[in-house]
Every structure is written in structure tokens, then in C-alpha cells.
Amino acid sequence: MASASGGGGGGAAAEAERPHQRPFLIGVSGGTASGKSTVCEKIMELLGQHEVDHRQRKLVILSQDRFYKVLTAEQKAKALKGQYNFDHPDAFDNDLMHMTLKHIVEGKTVEVPTYDFVTHSRLLETTVVYPADVVLFEGILVFYSQEIRDMFHLRLFVDTDSDVRLSRRVLRDMNRGRDLEQILTQYTTFVKPAFEEFCLPTKKYADVIIPRGVDNMGHHYLSWSSLHDYNLLMGLPASLLQSILHSANQSYFPKMQLPST
């Protein structure tokens, strides 16, 4: 068992019993290789959370990729050949994902699965996620299920050009040991159609759309009203709120018109 920052999992039971402020849950969606995790890491960097001990962090990042279903032997064989659709909503263990997010929103310590993209297997090792004031949950289909979508207090959509996303995906998957032909076949057969059918339509649910991801974070902003209203209702620590809003409204997220729904 590992912690969210890679340390040991000792003390998880005690942490789980400790009362904690309910977190502000932010969903970050977008197509494959759009820069979702990079945007999340940038927000963590802005708030000075990278060097903080995992038990004391006020912000944590969690990926939907951790919740891929356990594959059967037949499905795993297809996956190793690039013939399994990982971009379909049914590829995820949505019940486990919903239960985990529910516990996170309740301020509990949780254990989340670890997925190996080389062997396409869920590992026995889990990761402990300790209570935090802000939780960023990122993935291609985090807005697809209304049950999960409605849990987010703020929704961000990273909107990156498809050619850029494809080039990033090719480089990423080749680093995972896959050959170019398999990558391109999987993209045209599964990834691109699934993006157009399942991911892109959820863009309308976003409170904030970030074109070009982290490269363009100097021209967009986090919703002041969403964060301010939550602070009034839930008592988010003022110092953390001010840090987020300072980053949002000054250096990195100048005001933009929010998309209509």
C-alpha cells in the first residue's frame, strides 16, 4: 500500500477516523493527452503543495485511469494487441469510482487502485489518499455519468487540438513499449470515435474551458463565484481560497466568459 505521494500507508486507519473538513471537488476532463494531468500539476505547483507531506497536503490529484475494470484473460489479450476499447464508459469500474469519490467528499481516507498500463492489469498495491481541502479528479469521462458529474463543485475542460493530442499519445504509448502501427490503429478504431461520442459532448457541462491546456493557462480563469459560494456554504479555509483565487484572477487565470450550457 502506498500513499498519494509514494510513501508508506501507515496510520491510514487513524487518519480515516479523524474528523476532516469536506473537500472542494474539482473535475478536470478533456480528450486523451489533452494535458489534464499537467493542468492539475500546475495548480498544485501554484498552491505550493508539491513539497508538502502527503498527510498534510491541502490538495491532492486523483486520476480516473486508476478505475479501469479488471480484465478477463480474453480482454487482456485484446488489450495487448491494441484491440480493446479503453475509451468507452464501460471500460471503467464506475461503481467503485462513485463509492470512492463519495467517501472522499465525506472527508474520509480512501484506498484507490493502481493500474499498470504496460500489462493492462490492476495491481495488488493500492494508494492511500488522505483527506484534503481540494481534490482534483481528472479523466476523459469524468463528466459522462451524471451521478459522478453532479459531485463536482467546479468542472474544468481542457480543450486541445486533436493533432496535438495524437502526437502526444503516440510518444506516450511508444514509451510504454507499443509499436506505432498498433497505436494508430487503436486511435482510429477506438480513441477518436469514443472522444467524439462520449467525451466531447460533456464539454457543455464545464464551468471553465481551457483551450490548449497548461500552455494557455495565462488566458483563462477559475470561477470566482463557484469557489466563493462554496466557501460560504462549506467553510473552505480562507487562506487556501485566497491562494486559489489569487492564482485564478491574477497570474494564471484572467477573467474569461464562461461557456453557455
Image (cartoon, rainbow, N blue to C red):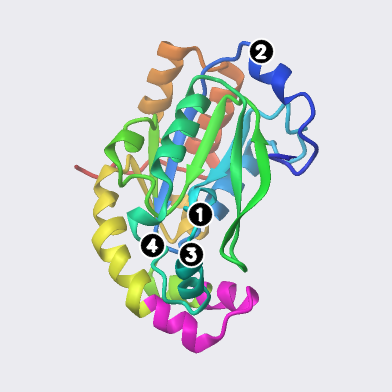
Residue at position x 61%, y 20% in the image: 239
Specify the amino acid type for callout 4: Asp
Residue 4 position, x and y percent, is: 68, 39
- Image: 191 above or below 104: below
Residue at position x 62%, y 25% in the image: 109
Spatial separation of the CA atoms under disc 3 and disc 1:
23 Å
What kind of element bears circle 4? loop
The residue indicated by pointer 4 is 87
Q: Earlier in the sequence, mark 3 or mark 4?
A: 3
The residue indicated by pointer 2 is 18
**Quadrant position of residue 174:** bottom right
Where residue 182 is drawn, which disc sits there? Answer: none
**Residue 121 horizontal side relative to residue 216, left or right:** right
Q: On the rendered image, what quadrant is the N terminus found in?
A: top right
Q: Earlier in the sequence, mark 4 or mark 1?
A: 1
What kind of element bears circle 3? loop
Specify the amino acid type for callout 2: Arg
Residue at position x 46%, y 38% in the image: 96
Specify the amino acid type for callout 1: Val
The residue indicated by pointer 3 is 33
Whether residue 65 appears in magenta in the rendering, the answer is no
The residue indicated by pointer 1 is 70
Whether residue 182 appears in magenta in the rendering, the answer is yes
Which sits in the foreground, 74 or 30? 74
Disc 1 packing (10 Å; few <14; some 14–19; many ≥20): some
Disc 2 packing (10 Å; few <14; some 14–19; many ≥20): few
Spatial separation of the CA atoms under disc 4 and disc 1:
15 Å
Q: Is residue 220 visible?
A: no
Residue at position x 45%, y 31% in the image: 99
Are the residues flagged by discs 4 and 1 in contact, CB closer than 8 Å?
Answer: no
